[in-house]
């Protein structure tokens, strides 16, 4: 198998023949041309991974030719061949769009290293483009599933605001798909080819969160053994998605506000300001206005975030979308598990339609994934649904306890099942479960330890 295809354009036959022999021996497929026009004709005929281009050609200036090639194929890797090397030559080469240049005479070992790097760089760029296309396909509007009136309104709103640079606040219960909407906003915006950087602000303590967001300089704190960039810098010219923003402390809120106002911040322990161009999309599953009234969320930050608000409805308010979502997840998890797409029986669909879905779309997705994995035929029936959807074995039902059980043991058992069921619905995210129970995370963690509940790994982020 060829390591890559290389086109050599040079008017000296000895150089063309020598390069073709050297490169073919190393496993590359090669073609050559002695003029710029002949090289352009070959580039039109078939794709190449790398162009080795002489600067001095009989019919064209190599740098001018490179600029024309760049307009036709911005991703083609190019290494210039020149009879002399200088800083001016290097500047001209890079300004014209070359990855590198090499001077005559050259070391074959050095040339092969440059060729390998250039070909690999081309492949990485192509893979990156394909990945971005795949992500865009997965998260564009077509993959935000729904035909209900609330979802159609959200589609219209996302289409209207995606191209703006305005801050967006997504509000909705846990599991309603806030990150999916955030990705759709990003991938349908002018920033789509720049980073989308998500961060769950409720999953880390204040010091770690600020270091994660703003970066730090070496020595800023005990474990800061080296300087590190933060997520704001990583998201420069892209989008930063701040999930669970209501959990953020007031001091961190003040720093976020400054970035929104001035687009500047300082690393932890630093003295130099860093300027960034980042679009903020924030998400919350609680009422920020109430937190403002309680003094737990800055009013000025709230108004900065609340430029455009998108309310995501809970699944119980869009039940007509459940069959579409079921079909969507059946296809997704059948593909992921390399098996035929199963059908859901009418008997199995009925409890899905009548259930209240406290965990929203995420809970439905978990149920369908489980059913696909456990299914052995082409149909998914009631037997593949969890008991709590069918009114059996709910954590809130009191089964007959052992005759010698004390009241304390019975209460502990019920509490254990309630917490375990909620954790399963929240994909074992303790922060989400604590929010559902309306208790501090520390309280929930104490109960988990006391009741010896085994925390499982999250199946997805």
Image: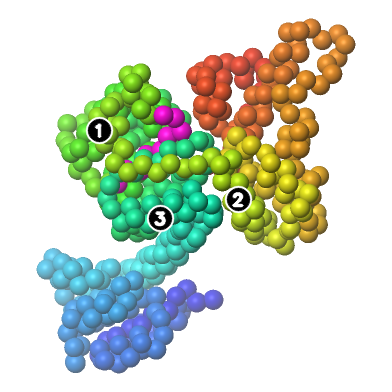
Dot 2: what SS? Answer: helix
- Cα distance, mark 1 to mark 3? 28 Å
Seen from the viewer's position, the closer of residues 98 and 187 is 187
The residue where tag 2 is placed is: 320
Q: Residues within 10 Å of mark 3 (few under 14, many from 20)?
A: few
At 24% from the left and 47% from the top, the residue drawn is 277
Image quadrant where one finds the N terminus: bottom right
Q: Between disc 1 and disc 3, whose residue precedes?
A: 3
Q: Would you say residue 283 sits in the magenta stretch?
A: yes
Region in magenta: 279-287
Q: Is residue 30 left or right of residue 148?
A: left
Q: Is residue 372 left or right of residue 90?
A: right
Q: How many marks?
A: 3
Q: Which quadrant of the structure image shows residue 456?
A: top right
Q: Do the numbered discs 1 and 3 sit on residues whose CB atoms are within 8 Å?
A: no
Residue 322 visible in this rendered orientation of the protein: yes
Q: Do the numbered discs 3 and 2 sit on residues whose CB atoms are within 8 Å?
A: no
- Which mark is nearer the camera, 1 or 2? 2
Dot 3: what SS? Answer: helix
Q: Between disc 3 and disc 2, whose residue precedes?
A: 3
- Which mark is nearer the camera, 1 or 3? 3
Look at the picture and state if 60 lies above or below 195: below
The residue where tag 1 is placed is: 257
The residue where tag 3 is placed is: 156
At 72% from the left and 13% from the top, the residue drawn is 411
Dot 1: what SS? Answer: helix
- Cα distance, mark 3 to mark 2? 19 Å
Q: Which quadrant of the structure image shows residue 301?
A: top left
x then y, percent, for residue 290: 38, 24
């Amino acid at each position: 198998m060829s390591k890559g295809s290389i086109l050599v354009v040079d008017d000296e036959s000895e150089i063309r023949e020598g390069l073709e022999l050297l490169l073919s021996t190393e496993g590359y497929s090669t073609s050559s041309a002695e003029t710029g026009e002949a090289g352009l004709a070959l580039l039109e005929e078939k794709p190449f991974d790398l162009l080795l281009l002489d600067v001095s050609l009989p019919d064209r200036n190599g740098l001018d030719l490179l600029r024309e090639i760049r307009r036709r194929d911005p991703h083609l890797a190019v290494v210039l061949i020149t009879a002399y090397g200088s800083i001016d030559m290097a500047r001209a080469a890079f300004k014209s769009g070359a990855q590198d240049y090499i001077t005559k005479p050259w070391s074959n070992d050095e040339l092969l290293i440059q060729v390998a790097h250039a070909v690999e760089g081309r492949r990485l760029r192509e893979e990156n483009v394909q990945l971005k296309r795949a992500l865009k396909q997965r998260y564009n509007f077509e993959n935000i599933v729904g035909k209900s009136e609330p979802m159609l309104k959200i589609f219209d709103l996302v289409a209207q605001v995606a191209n703006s640079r305005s801050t967006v606040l997504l509000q909705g219960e846990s599991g309603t798909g806030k990150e999916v909407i955030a990705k759709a906003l990003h991938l349908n915006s002018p920033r789509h080819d720049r980073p989308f950087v998500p961060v769950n602000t409720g999953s880390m303590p204040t010091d770690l969160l600020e270091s994660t967001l703003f970066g730090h300089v070496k020595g800023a704190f005990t474990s800061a053994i080296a300087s590190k960039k933060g997520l704001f810098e990583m998201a420069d010219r892209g989008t930063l998605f701040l999930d669970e923003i209501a959990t953020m402390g007031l001091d961190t809120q003040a720093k976020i506000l400054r970035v929104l106002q001035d687009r500047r911040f300082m690393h932890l322990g630093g003295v130099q300001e860093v300027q960034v161009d980042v679009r903020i999309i924030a998400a919350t599953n609680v009422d920020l206005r109430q937190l403002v009234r309680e003094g737990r969320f800055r009013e000025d930050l709230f108004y900065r975030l609340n430029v455009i608000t998108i309310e995501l409805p809970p699944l119980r308010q869009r039940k007509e979308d459940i069959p579409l979502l079921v079909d969507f997840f059946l296809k997704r998890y059948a593909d992921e598990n390399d098996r035929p797409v199963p059908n859901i029986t009418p008997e199995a669909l009925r409890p899905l339609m009548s259930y209240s879905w406290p965990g929203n779309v995420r809970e439905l997705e978990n149920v369908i994934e489980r059913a696909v994995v456990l299914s052995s035929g082409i149909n998914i029936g009631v037997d593949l649904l969890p008991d709590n959807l069918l009114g059996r074995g709910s954590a809130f039902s009191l089964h007959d306890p052992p005759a010698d059980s004390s009241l304390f043991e019975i209460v502990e058992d019920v509490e254990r099942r309630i917490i375990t069921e909620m954790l399963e619905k929240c994909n074992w995210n303790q922060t989400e479960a604590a929010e559902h129970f309306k208790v501090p995370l520390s309280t929930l963690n104490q109960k988990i330890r006391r009741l010896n509940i085994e925390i499982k790994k999250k199946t997805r982020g």
